[in-house]
Amino acid sequence: MSAREDVLGAVRAALGRGPRGGRADAVGAGDVPRGYRVATDTASGSVAACDLLEHRLLDYRARVTRCRPEEVAATVVRELAGAASVAVPHGLPEAWADAVRATGATVRDDVPGRPLAAAELDRTDAVVTGCRVAVADTGTIVLDAGPGQGRRVLTLVPDRHVCVVRSDQVVGSVPEAVRLLEAHPERPLTWISGPSATSDIELVRVEGVHGPRDLRVVLVGP
Amino acid sequence: MPAVPPKPAAEPLDPLRWGPTFPEAARGTLDDAQLRTNLRRATRTIRDKRLAVTAELPDWEALRDAGAAIKADAMDRLPELLEQLEANVTAHGGTVHWARDAAEANRIVTGLVRAAGAREVVKVKSMATQEIGLNEHLEAEGITAHETDLAELIVQLAGDRPSHILVPAIHRNRDEIRDVFRSQMPGVPDRLTNEPAALAMAAREHLRALFLRADVAISGANLAIAETGTVAVVESEGNGRMCLTLPRTLVTVMGIEKVLPTFRDLEVFLQLLPRSSTGERMNPYTTTWTGVTPGDGPQEFHLVLLDNGRTRALADDVGRQALHCIRCSACLNVCPVYERTGGHAYGSVYPGPIGAILTPQLLGLDDADAATASLPFASTLCGACYDACPVKIDIPTALVHLRDRALHDGGPRRPTAAGAAMGAAAVVLSSGRRFRWALRGAALAGRLLGGRRVRRLPWPGSLWTASRDLPALPARSFRGAWAARVARVSRATRDTPAAPDGRDPRSGERSPGTDGRGRP
């Protein structure tokens, strides 16, 4: 017997079923009580949602800058100050990439078919991306590798991550974010809440172990 | 020689259960004042943080109810969910392997690392791979496994064993960690201080080179979604992201109980887990992946589904709920026994209250040795673990159930100190007259001792006082104090009218000479 058949057989036997037995009275997912909140009092895209997101991100020692839509490129450039090299994911709005190029920094484009090597990213100071959704309640930004968000390695290896979040991408709660993301569960997801951190030594929080030590969120208001 | 001696020194044969019985092991760890100090500080900090962030959510109890129900439902439908998970992982370009036990899982992983042509691997912290002793097995096969979680790295470099599910080096303070790094980490700065930030940066430098050159990574999984084939790892440092993203091949070892039915279930567990484990609203990083994504992350993905005793636990209707555990370790941090004995006393990768019910079931209580069978007794049954558990595992009930099984179900039947004490207590407590005499004796002893604590009793009382002080004996028993009070009240009310309800205050008092059921 294969290990697969043995394990499945042992599971069925433990549940008191026959060797190939199914469950006529199978408990469906609908039977799970879901009395928890799906939406919170903080309406998605509202000023209150953005304020809460900012508050939560600051609590994690991320840096937050608010700006108006027409100020995004200039704000991104300001947040990149001091970075000699910047990685740019495929699909990032051209206006932002052009503004970064205009500063004289070395821009490394990550393009399908010509991906940046990890070693090259290790020599890159910063990366600029957008995001899929942000959760105000927990101070979380979610990237799903869609256009302008980059492959997972892009937001991981450079030490500074400048992430642009539009107010209409800010939802109140974790369940609201999951409702959006379940349209494409097959995409690799990266949930980011503040910079990399550890509390393994006497539970003292230290920012920056392996991921970006410097997370800068550009929060774009209406 | 490491500057800081490993604790415990010997490498265990079975990471799931090693060493002596819990009481014997606890006797040793209780003597370690430094360990108790480290633990008290750490568990208190994390307890307070958890309470603060769970109190923030008005629907915390509803989330716990949903978490418990989802887990119970998943266990009920486990065969179907595992088949569904396998089908969806495969459909997205992954490969699923099944392992009956630790040896089989180790063989599978070793074969996969060899096939990738690798001699070293990077590892994400994982309870499942610790449970099967994967690192030791790989080492024996000539493959080096680098732990990349900071705490796991500390434990690995020190030649130590983890003592906590979430914070494996919780028993080490910053000075000890600096000494371990200085003596064991290649290329560490000469003047490394004991500042946590400096120690973390030394680890960053050490590990980054490994991440960038590794071809194979090995991880566990916090959960996997049957409906979509999505696997998730929840972490803080980014070492998880490094392992899950950089190498060409990813091998994930996952206990079969970690499967969840639907993608929507993420919203429950991503709220319950971080708040319960590190006391944060959300952990810094969560990664989910579904099979292989062309051009992004590992291009080869293997999922190893591990039984290793889980079906044995599943067969026990009461004990089964131990499989609901999401490894948050909230139960460890609130447990008065864990706080004093530390994790090593449990002699398993699964310490604390959850370990006390999980380990004996994974190994089977039917032919349990005395050391494993002692674990369900490693508790005061205070119930704090049940209150803290995000998926409402009724650990106290499971402990009592497993104690019964350990004593009657083919477990070791030798008389225990607790059994002897209970037998003696039964003789005294079953008769009011004997109890009264016993109290008079105790009160007399109390007066003789003048309120001093008793540190050592003669045998068999020494079994108790070996690990505890006897509290100071009061000079007067409750019964004696009550009788005196009644006499005082009677004197005071002798000349006053009866109470408004017409009841004589004297007869309204229960006679001190009866046992509560009217018997003398």
Image: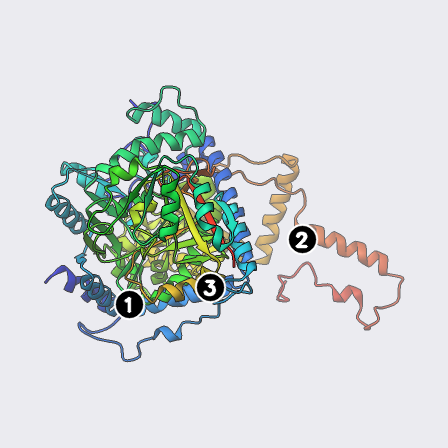
Q: How crowded is mark 2: few (under 14 residues within 10 Å), some or many (20 or more)?
A: some
Q: In terms of depth relative to the viewer, which is nearer, B146 or B170?
A: B146
Q: In which quarter of the image is residue B119?
A: top left
Secondary structure under the numbered disc 2 in the rendered image = helix
Estimate the x, y position of residue A190 in percent, counting from the top left.
35, 53
For the residue marked with disc 1, what is the amino acid?
Glu
Q: Which of marks 2 and 1 is in front?
A: 1
Residue most extreme to the bottom: A24
For the residue marked with disc 3, what is the amino acid?
Leu
**Residue under pointer 2:** B479
Estimate the x, y position of residue B499 in percent, counting from the top left.
83, 68
Q: In terms of depth relative to the viewer, which is nearer, B259 or A212?
A: A212
Q: Nearer the viewer, mark 3 or mark 2?
A: 3
The CA distance from mark 3 to mark 1 is 21 Å
On screen, B405 above or below A31? above
User: What's the chain of the residue with tag 3?
Assistant: B
Could one spot residue B194 in this view of the protein? yes
Residue at 24% x, 70% y is: B80
Q: In terms of depth relative to the viewer, which is nearer, B158 or A143?
A: A143
**Residue under pointer 1:** B227
Q: In which quarter of the image is the C terminus of chain B?
A: bottom right
